[in-house]
Amino acid sequence: MKKLLFIFFSIILLSACNNEAEVANYIKQADTYREEGRLVDAISLYNKALDLKEDSKIREKLNETEKEKETIEKTQNALDIFKEVDTYYLQDSDYVSPVKIKEATDKLRDAIDEIEKLDDTKQTDISEFVKNLKESSDYKQVKNYVESNVTDDAETMESLAFLYEDFQVLNEVGASLFNIIGVNISNIANMEIPSKYKEN
């Protein structure tokens, strides 16, 4: 009977040791993947480790990696809006109508609102990228522009331009200002998130 109990407890102990070793391997590989920017793979391995052993430290790593992945996605979405504005609102001609400028500004406002919500305090490459973006003069110029009331009553301004020359001149000045800000928009549109995240 003692021999059977010894074998039974030995099996349990070996199984626990094997689980610990497997968990450690998962975490080590997941940490490597995260460092390389392979966040989907890292998340998968952290989850496998948690399936074997619930641990607050592993759970924290998983949560941080998921937030890092979310930050990448939101940052890329915001940059895509800048690219859209650069491509469809700034490339056609020197004159952009007040209504088109308002459309573009509304899109940029959404992108900037998204960027402002992003956490740039983490010790990750994407967090550092967001911080540098927010501190760039291009971003500050565009942010100031979209926060101004320069596009208010765009439809009225466009309609009045057909009747009064002075309003047409004002609209042309507005278009010129938009094109000046367009340089800053283009600079942001051409920014790319760190290359190590390209697989995500």
Image: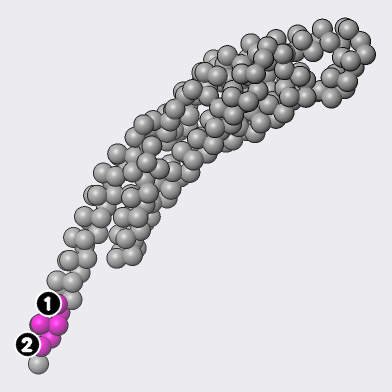
Residue 67 percent coordinates (x, y): 46, 45
Quarter of the image where the N terminus is located: bottom left
Residue 10 badge: 1
| Residue appearing at x 85%, y 18% in the figure | 157
Identify the residue at image location x=54%, y=15%. 137
Provide the residue span drawn in magenta: 2-11
Q: Position of residue 180 (x, y in %)?
A: 64, 11
Magenta segment, prevailing SS (helix, strand or loop): helix
- Indicate the colouring scheme: one colour
Residue placed under numbered mark 2 in the picture: 3
Q: Which residue is painted at 35% across and 58% down in the image?
A: 47
* Image quadrant assignment for residue 83: top right
Question: 91 and 63: which one is in front?
Answer: 91
Q: In the figure, 112 relative to 30: above or below?
A: above
Where is residue 160, by image quadrant?
top right
Lower sequence index among marks 1 and 2: 2
Q: Quadrant of the C terminus?
A: top left
Mark pair 1, 2: CA separation: 10 Å
Percent position of residue 179, x then y = 65, 13
Describe the element under mark 2 as helix, strand or loop: helix
| Element type at mark 1 | helix
Residue 114 vs residue 18, the one in the foreground:
114
- The residue furthest left is 3
Amino acid under disc 2: Lys
Between residues 70 and 122, which one lies in front from this camera angle? Answer: 70
**Mark 1 crowdedness (10 Å alpha carbons): few <14, some 14-19, many ≥20:** few
Q: For the image shown, how many numbered marks are present on the structure?
A: 2
The reply to whether discs 1 and 2 touch (Cβ–Cβ < 8 Å) is no
